[in-house]
Image (tube, rainbow, N blue to C red):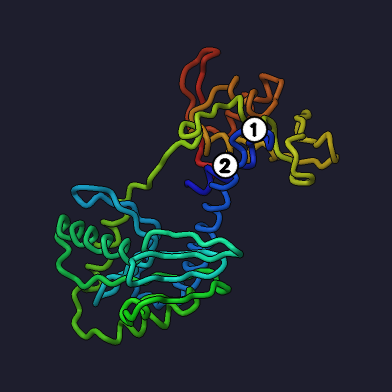
Amino acid sequence: MPHLQVSTLFRRLPREHPLFSEIESEFLKQSAGHYGENTVYHFLHYLPSDYLILKDLHLFDGHNHFQIDFLVISKNFLLIIEVKNFKGELIFDFDNSQLLRRLAETLEVFPDPFLQVEHQKIQLAQWLALYDFGNIPIYSFIAIANPNTKIETLGNQPCKKERLVRAKGLVSAVYNLSARFSKKFYSTNEMTQLSERLMAENTPYHVSLLKKYNLSIKDLTPGVLCKGCSCFTMERRRDHWCCKACGVKSKKAHLEALRDYQILFGSVVTSAEIKSFTGIHSDYHAKTILIENSAKIIGKTKDRKYVLKPLF
């Protein structure tokens, strides 16, 4: 959801807006993280079915919330995978507990991901105790998603170094970890129960970027996006949309605009709001589109509200 929000906001925010550069930076950061997680997910799918893979967990340990990129569940152990997707050269400074990134002539300092996953292990163990899932070993990997990233380590800590894994090497690394264990802590049924409980307790972190940056609908570019020229220049005709810039026609161009609205503002919308957001001038066309794409309608007057069906 964070990536959907920032990508939608970035597409809708005019380039001349004073916050455009800040939103662009956030978009690029989120895009890199999103791409990195998708890359890791692709390779983890090559694990056999006796491993369960959960993505983007946001849990409460009884004291604080914590987030895990990936959790691999097996009968013998749990594995936390923290994903890093950086360009350039990564320098893991084990002695000083920090991560350095060298790109061109710039050297940046980031928090140590090993400290991060160690704390996640403590929090996950507390969460497991809360729900009576026993004392199973918990391990962690730092997955480097970009295959072109150069990796360097400082300090003699081989245990940490072996937990640095390229995305493409994750399956082999999991197999090597599994070979160390003979004791089974969970049955297949208990693995399933744990997975279901984790998903039930997962509370995805949600923050409104519009509130965060103090933006309103007036700051955004209104209209319906044309797939032909990537401009918000589609006009509603009797039964279709037509781009006044390039002439491309579509019967369903409004669906992406409704999706954008839902991502940024939520699922409840009025006819006046959707007219303002899409540039539709006709009350009839606006109401028709909303009725077709709503799961529920609230009220019977001109202040009627529509609850959009899930569009993303």
Could you tell whether 248 is left or right of 107 in the image?
A: right
Which quadrant would residue 250 be assigned to in this image? top right
Could you tell whether 85 is left or right of 110 in the image?
A: right
Percent across and percent down for residue 202 are 32, 51
Between discs 1 and 2, the one toward the N terminus: 1
Q: Is residue 61 above or below residue 146?
A: above
In front of the other: 211 or 128: 211
Give neighbour class at mark 1: few <14, some 14-19, many 20+ (Cα, 10 Å).
few
Percent across and percent down for residue 9 are 58, 39
Callout 1 secondary element = loop
Name the kind of residue labelled 1 in the image. Answer: His
In front of the other: 191 or 16: 16
In front of the other: 293 or 59: 59
Residue drawn 57% across and 64% down?
103
Q: Which residue is mark 1?
A: 17
Q: Is residue 200 visible?
A: no
Callout 2 secondary element = helix
Q: Which residue is mark 2?
A: 23
Residue drawn 26% across and 68% down?
191
Residue drawn 22% across and 67% down?
190
Percent across and percent down for residue 222 are 67, 30
Name the kind of residue labelled 2 in the image. Answer: Ile
Which quadrant would residue 198 be assigned to in this image? bottom left
